[in-house]
Amino acid sequence: VFEGVEHKKSEDTSEMYSSASEEKGNLKARSQGTLTDPFKKRVPDSFYEREKRLLGVLPRSYEIGYTAANKPYYVDNESKTTSWIDPRTEKTRSKDVMRCKMGELPYGWEEEIDKDVGVYYIDHNTHSTFLDPPWDPRVQNQVYQLESFLA
């Protein structure tokens, strides 16, 4: 308690904790105005299965490395660079986020789960993260503005 500041103790703290819990649970209001489980991935396994069938082999100068957490990254030995983006997905994913369909990820994007926030999306092209999926029109608008700014 600070000197000169009146501090009122809430009679019913359960309401405060309940609303905070609800707020955390509803942190991720999803597309089309519906609320869903914030820890449930939105990109279906079928997207990854289809992509895996289409990928083929890595380009000759590339190899796959793995972090301590077993996350893959891609090493281009020719240019001596590394990337989180699988170079083969350049042919399997759209590079235009505006053409992204529900349940798909554009080139350079991945879906991850954070233990506190839930599902979020990483755009490695613009080095940005989003709580909403790339097929959400709000995200598409933000990416368009980012790409325009970075160009």
Image (cartoon, helix red, strand yellow):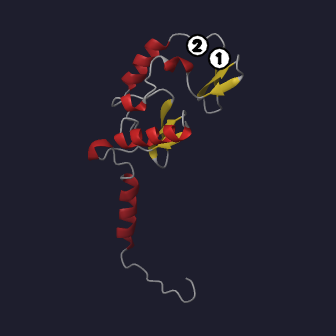
Q: In the image, what residue type sits under mark 1?
A: Glu
Measured as percent of width and height from the top left, residue 144 is found at 44, 38
Asked which secondary structure carries label 1, the reply is strand
134 or 150: nearer the viewer: 150
Asked where in the image residue 44 lies, by quadrant, the reply is top left
Give the answer, above or below, for where 79 lies relative to 36.
above
Q: Is residue 127 visible?
A: no
21 or 65: nearer the viewer: 65
Residue sitting at the far bottom: 4
Residue of label 2:
58
Q: Does 123 sit left or right of 37 as displayed? A: right
* Residue contact at pointers 1 and 2, CB within 8 angstroms: yes
Q: In the image, what residue type sits under mark 2?
A: Leu
What residue sits 39% from the left and 23% below the top? 47
Disc with the residue nearer the chain's start (1 vs 2): 2
Asked where in the image residue 99 lies, by quadrant, the reply is top left
Structural crowding at the residue carrying mark 1, measured as other residues with C-alpha within 10 Å and reported as few (<14), some (14–19) or many (≥20): few
- Structural distance between the alpha carbons of marks 1 and 2: 7 Å
What residue sits 40% from the left and 65% below the top? 17
The number of numbered discs placed on residues in the rendered structure image is 2
Q: Locate the C terminus and report the quarter of the image it occupies.
A: top right
Q: Is residue 7 visible?
A: yes
Measured as percent of width and height from the top left, residue 120 is found at 46, 41
What residue sits 60% from the left and 29% below the top? 70
What residue sits 49% from the left and 31% below the top? 109
Structural crowding at the residue carrying mark 2, measured as other residues with C-alpha within 10 Å and reported as few (<14), some (14–19) or many (≥20): few
Residue of label 1:
63
Give the answer, above or below, for where 28 lies relative to 63.
below
Measured as percent of width and height from the top left, residue 25 is found at 38, 52
111 or 130: nearer the viewer: 130
Measured as percent of width and height from the top left, residue 106 is found at 44, 28
Q: Does 79 sit left or right of 20 as displayed? A: right
